[in-house]
Image: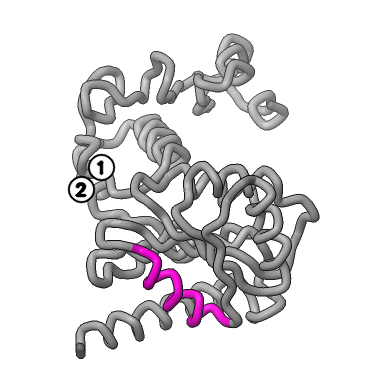
Amino acid sequence: MKLFANQQATDFAVLNFDDPALRSLAEDVQSKAVSFALDSPAQAEIRDGFLRIGGEPVCAMDRIKLRGKHNLYNVLAAVAAVNCAEVSLEPAEKVLADFRGVANRLEEVAVVNGITFINDSQATIPQAVEVALEAMETPTVLIAGGRAKVSDFSSLAKAIAQRAKALVVIGEAGPAIATAARAAGFSSIHESATLPQAVQTAFSLAEPGEIVLMSPACASFDMFTNMAHRGEVFRRAVRDLEMEKSVK
């Protein structure tokens, strides 16, 4: 809000109108307020199967490949911001259809025997994993664990119990995550000594049409140089699995 307070009349404030505080701020900013929302009327919105700006269709929603409600907010905010620049939105549909995200953030690595492997190594806190699980639309085997940043995994455990098919834990925090999941009434829990081993275990637990999601809820430093290194090890393990299955 302090950033918005420093704007001028020729600037734009792109505001999420699903947030009551930001919606009310629209009346107070000195700049031109531009709204986006999923659940409220807004200038950038999703209606009748299309992402729309000012009611005009920009892109059919079935062409957008990014997963999760949080990414739909990102898409709406981005398109709303571009529209402020008064440039043509004609290329937006192709861009949105082609863009599949960035490395380590719900990155689709491969589909092996009908099972989709997703790398979310950037998710180093439990809340990020809860968002990732919410974004999955089919049964999901979760790989989680590493060096804990928090001491309480109870909220994550509830999300696992509600949304995961199975849990494969790795690293220093693996036992703590497993304990929290059991306390939440979840029983399909498996331990792996390494991430490649976890990939193999998760693959054995998933069925065609389901997802293996590596979303650790922890830092990577117990087993890897950093989160990017962890993501690369996951990618390599999935590619090795893909090669193994294609040879057979």
Label 1: element kind: helix
Label 2: element kind: helix
The residue at 48%/51% (across/down) is 164
Per the rendered image, the range of residues in magenta is 194-206
Say if 2 sits above or below 129 in the image: above
Q: Check disc 1 and report the residue beneath it.
A: 92
Label 1 is placed on what type of residue? Ala
At which x and y percent is residue 47?
Answer: 27, 21
The residue at 47%/39% (across/down) is 70
Say if 67 sits above or below 113 in the image: above
Q: Are marks 2 and 1 in contact (CB under 8 Å)?
A: yes
Q: Check disc 2 and report the residue beneath it.
A: 94
Judging depth in this view, the residue of 245 and 22 nearest the camera is 245
The residue at 36%/25% (across/down) is 44
Q: How did the renderer colour the structure?
A: one colour
Helix, strand or loop for the magenta stretch, by majority: helix
The residue at 68%/24% (across/down) is 5
Judging depth in this view, the residue of 154 and 71 nearest the camera is 154
